[in-house]
Image (cartoon, rainbow, N blue to C red):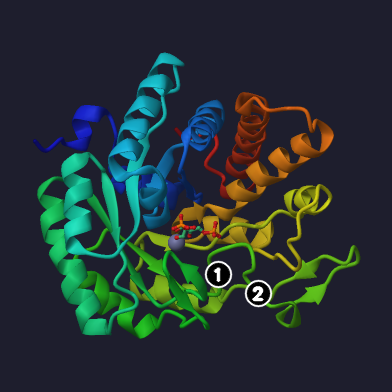
Amino acid sequence: MATNYKDIGFVNTKEMFKKAFEGKYAIPAFNFNNLEQIQAVINGCGESKSPVILQVSSGARKYADQTMLRYMAEGAMQMAKEKGYNIPVALHLDHGDTYELCVSCIESGFSSVMIDGSHHPYEKNIELTRKVVEYAHKYDVSVEGELGVLAGIEDDVVAAKSIYTQPDEVEDFVSRTGVDSLAISIGTSHGAFKFKPEQCTKNKDGVLVPPPLRFDILEEIEKRIPGFPIVLHGASSVLPEYVNLINNNGGALEAAVGIPAEQLRKAAKSAVCKINIDSDGRLVVTGMIRKIFAEKPEEFDPRKYLGPARDELTKMIIDKNTHVLGSAGRA
Ligand code: G3H
Ligand code: 13P
Ligand code: ZN
């Protein structure tokens, strides 16, 4: 028996993106795989009064099971209500790769899906995306499409080099597919190693500074599809504070580098209405667990290391919403 997301209390992304575009901020889209991550996302967004997109990747579905994650999201909604958090929450499929997967998420209560046809030839991408849009819109579910390929690991697909989105294609793609938002490639990539050290310069503290995002391409895209919501994947900053926490407690993340906060601030003020963050959360959790294991080798109660990891993740989320995305206080 199919469930409509509205009966659970989720919202689609339409209104969120309209407000984000007009208000010149971006909605955070946080990936979750387990209890502590979803608690941190809801608590962090609830405390900072930010709308939020909870997103489920293919790795998350393999790890935790799609049905489990969907009911965790419903539980999180219920908890948010009981805590008095009055924030819009969307449940989104991240990097959906087939029509059937999108249908199964929509039938189970997701309010938004991404159909990532970016690895297909252009016409095949259009055909697949259009098919998903036709189904999703019957239920008022939002659809995100993608044009251009991000370097790095995009779920199970590894691309050696970014293929930037071609501004000449976006108008045709958006009008022929009917998508509600468009993920683009302007130099971001997934994971904690977004740039090779030789692509970067070093600042006075020896921190690697990556080449800037291609804001020129973004501006061209904005001209072709004025007012249309753009999505940035691979947008973690790979915060040096947490990379150091990992490395100072037995980890070995050499040359991890992400997107500097000031570039994300600039993007959030543009047509970019959704910013995807997964790796930053992974780094926080790993750093905190490593620290606790190093300081308290006798500890064996998971609540004693997962709890502090969750609390630090909540802090990081509040900070992102407040100081980077500008979504705090917009719920
Ligand atoms: O799309 C990229 C996300 O970071 C998800 O990665 O499939 O390993 O969970 P994952
Ligand atoms: P990061 O790896 O930069 O966090 O990107 C996550 C993402 O784009 C999920 O779709
Ligand atoms: Zn992504």
Residue 64 spot, x, y in % from top left: 39, 43
N-terminal label among 2 and 1: 1
- From this viewpoint, is residue 219 visible? no
Q: Quadrant of the N terminus?
A: top left
Residue 321 coordinates in the image, percent (x, y): 57, 41
Q: Position of residue 148 (x, y in %)?
A: 40, 78
Which residue extends farthest right?
A: 204
Q: Which mark is residue 188?
A: 1
Instruction: Answer yes or no: disc 1 within 8 Å of ligand 2.
Output: yes
Compared to 290, does 145 lie above or below? below
24, 259: nearer the viewer: 259
Name the secondary structure under disc 1: loop
Above or below, comparing residue 117 to residue 230 in the picture: below
Q: Secondary structure at mark 2?
A: loop
Pick the residue in front: 296 or 200: 296
Task: Check residue 195 in the rendering and tell me which mark sits there, or answer none.
Answer: 2
| Nearer to us in this view, 43 or 244 | 244
The residue shown at (55%, 74%) is 187
Say which residue appears at 35% left-offset and 21% top-offset. Answer: 78
